[in-house]
Amino acid sequence: MKNSIILAILLILLTAGANAQKVDQAFFDQTDIFFKKFVKDGLIDYAHIEEDANFQQLIQSLESADLSGTDQSTKIAFYINAYNLLVIKRIVDNYPLESVFSEVGFFASNKVRLEGKTVSLNTIEKEYLLKNLPDPRYHFVLVCGAKGCPPIVSFAYRPEEISQQLENQTRIAFNNPYFIRVDPSKRKVDLSQIFKWYKNDFGGTKESALEYINEYREEKIPQDYEIGFYTYDWSLNEQSMDMPLSDLKNNNAGRYITSNTVPKGTFESRSFYNLYSQTFLDGENVRQRSTFFTSTYSLVYGLTNNFNIGFDLRYRRVNNSPGSSSFLNVFGGLDDPNGRQGFTNIGPKIRWAPTQYLPNFSIQSAFWIPIGQDLEGSETRPYIDWDGASWLTQLFNDFSVGSNFSLFTELDFFIEDIGGADDLNRFSTPVTTILSYFPNPKTTIYALANFSPFWQQDFDYFVQGGLGFKYQFNPKFEFELLYTKFTNEFLQNNNGRAATYNVGFRFNR
């Protein structure tokens, strides 16, 4: 029995030794071939990597690599190449995606195989390299899959050249006006967030980081310049391509994420048409109908990838009529005191994505200014909108759930009728959740639930739920339909019923 156990242990050790592969020149040659094939101008052709046999062999060689007996230069070159290859592997496994932060735990989760172990990308960078083989120049050759990183090179890092390659890439990065942004007119320099996140690798202060940078700069930056940090661009460092949505394997990946900011220099235009109609019993027990048609037109522009500006414009029609009448009467001739129409609000808006760690989280805020007269109505004119201004702030987030679902959440802070005649602002905090299903990359089917409490002396609320449909004709144009059922205390107390019918269009340029 004892001899059998010893023999089994020996067989396991021999098998492990047979699977392990010494890192040799062939690994660096194959890595060089891969980067030359798929990297151009610092961008990567992710779309065509998955089926590449050389790439699959490289990933297998990383898992079985054996660095025992190798010198320091070989370890440094191997770990740099390994990091860059495994970042690409993680992206390809989840491709297409907008950012590495679209995948939760991209850097921190133990999801890559290296030297027979399951490790995280952070482990390779922070332990294997920065801790065990310290050199701040690694920050300019380790590429995190984002455009904010120094551009990835189209060659392998090699043991016999690694010192000079580190020197060259650091020098290239520090003389790149996009990476080190100098503005002599303002006597200011903006640095990459890398110098903030890893400040101890550069002396611990902004001033010491500038001294380090100047060691490699052809044109030195004066030490008395103001030093700041620009926003890191976490968008994917991929080569531009036009992939038909029908070619996507992950239906979730083709969708347009409503909560995102629009990229710098682009526009998003939206028009949304909401028809709300309710019937109820009045004080004389006679059924009445009130119908509102609201058209909202929105335009936002990307000042940066993380900050957008724009405006909203709202047009409304209202019709009050007997309960037996059709809600479509709101589109007919509107005569006081039963109906009216007009533009009611216009105002600026902003949308901001405050952190790269939640790439689908954004904050949107709009301030609507009334542009009509006597909007709240009178005995001879119906209500169409508030006489005072309104301020709406919305917190959006979106979570992918597998390949075919997502969960959208929204929390609003809404103040209405600011400065109105009654001097009583209405404050509400609507909460919305939307569960979406993607049967294919172009189509979305979703369920919506909303609860809106009004925090006032006489507490009020409304609740609505419904089903919607979206279709992307292409990534820039989308069509939407939504139907919801609606209720509140007034409707419940007066045998009322209400519903909304909605149509929306989105266009990006």
Image (cartoon, helix red, strand yellow):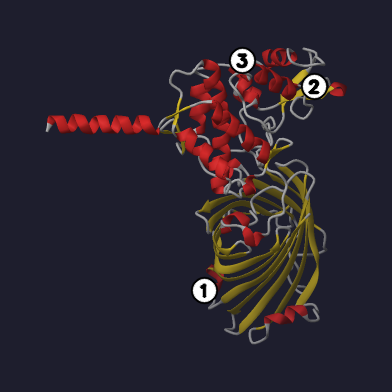
The residue beneath circle 1 is: 493
The residue beneath circle 3 is: 204
Disc 2 on helix, strand or loop?
Answer: strand
Q: Nearer the viewer's eye, disc 1 or disc 3?
A: 3
Chain-order first, disc 1 or disc 2: 2
- In the image, residue 172 lies at what x, y percent? 74, 23
Chain-order first, disc 1 or disc 3: 3
Regarding residue 237, the answer to whether it shows in the image is: no
- The image shows residue 471, relative to residue 33, as above or below, that is below
- The image shows residue 216, relative to residue 481, as above or below, that is above
Q: CA distance from mark 1 to mark 3?
A: 66 Å
Left or right, 127 with reference to 486 = left
Q: Residue at x 57, y 59 (%)?
A: 251
Q: Quadrant of the C terminus?
A: bottom right
Q: Residue at x 57, y 35 (%)?
A: 85
The residue beneath circle 2 is: 188
Q: Nearer the viewer's eye, disc 1 or disc 2?
A: 2
Q: What amino acid is found at the position of numbered circle 2 in the picture?
A: Lys
- In the image, residue 469 lies at what x, y percent? 61, 68
Regarding residue 177, the answer to whether it shows in the image is: yes
Q: What amino acid is found at the position of numbered circle 3 in the picture?
A: Gly
- In the image, residue 374 lies at what x, y percent? 80, 64
Are the residues tagged 2 and 3 within 8 Å (C-beta)?
no
Q: Badge 2: how crowded within 10 Å, few (<14), some, or many (20+)?
A: some
- The image shows residue 497, relative to residue 260, as above or below, that is below
Q: CA distance from mark 1 to mark 2?
A: 65 Å
Q: Quadrant of the N terminus?
A: top left
